[in-house]
Image (spheres, rainbow, N blue to C red):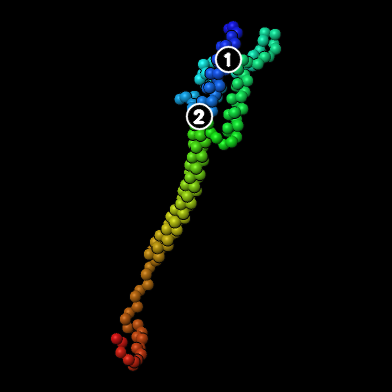
Amino acid sequence: MGRISDSDRSRNEEAIRAAMDRLLRGDIPSGGRCDLKTLAAEAGVTRTGFYPKKDRDGTVREGPYQHLGDEFVRRLAALRESGEVVDPRDAQIERLKAHNAELKGRVADRDKTVEELTAFKKLALSRLAAQHDEIMHLRSQPSPEPAPLAKLATVPRAKTAVIGSCS
């Protein structure tokens, strides 16, 4: 691929700056992200222009739009440091991570409750079984013979005088 003319380069730089401003404002195309790949696609240039080039003799030179790529990365980092979320997908990811953490906490709480209820059920069943065994044991013992009425002692009733009316 040959070198581009100065007018093409300046036109491409203007397109890159316009695309950079749109992306950093949050105007991201569907399926895109706030990154160099989307910047290159929006500007209509190849993204290899944002990276250093290696000549045949092994020397490394700056890509034609590398300074703009570096500026884009710096501005994006500054926006992120200030707390502004440019990419709605990043905001969605953060929201989903928080929701996931909340759900994990709820599941852990429910697991603890299930464990406690299982232990309570086991204890209750063992107590019921012990009570049942005791009842069955008491029922299997011969009951004592009822005492004849003649042997029963009568309790004398005390005669008390009525003091006042009961109503």
- The amino acid on which the numbered mark 1 sits, given as a three-letter code, is Ser
Above/below status of 125 relative to 163: above
> Based on the displayed image, in which of its 4 quarters is residue 125 positioned?
bottom left
Identity of the residue furthest to the top in this view: 2
Secondary structure type for disc 2 = loop
Residue at image position (67%, 10%) is: 55
Above/below status of 53 relative to 101: above
Give whichever of 85, 55 is nearer the camera: 85
User: Which quadrant holds the N terminus?
Assistant: top right
Q: Does residue 48 appear in the picture of this structure?
A: no
Residue at image position (63%, 15%) is: 63
Give whichever of 28, 141 is nearer the camera: 28
Which residue is identified by label 1? Answer: 10
Identity of the residue furthest to the left in this view: 167
Above/below status of 55 relative to 135: above
Q: CA distance from mark 1 to mark 2?
A: 25 Å
User: Which quadrant holds the C terminus?
Assistant: bottom left
> Based on the displayed image, in which of its 4 quarters is residue 151 positioned?
bottom left
Which residue is identified by label 2? Answer: 26
In the displayed structure image, the side of residue 140 where residue 98 appears, left or right: right
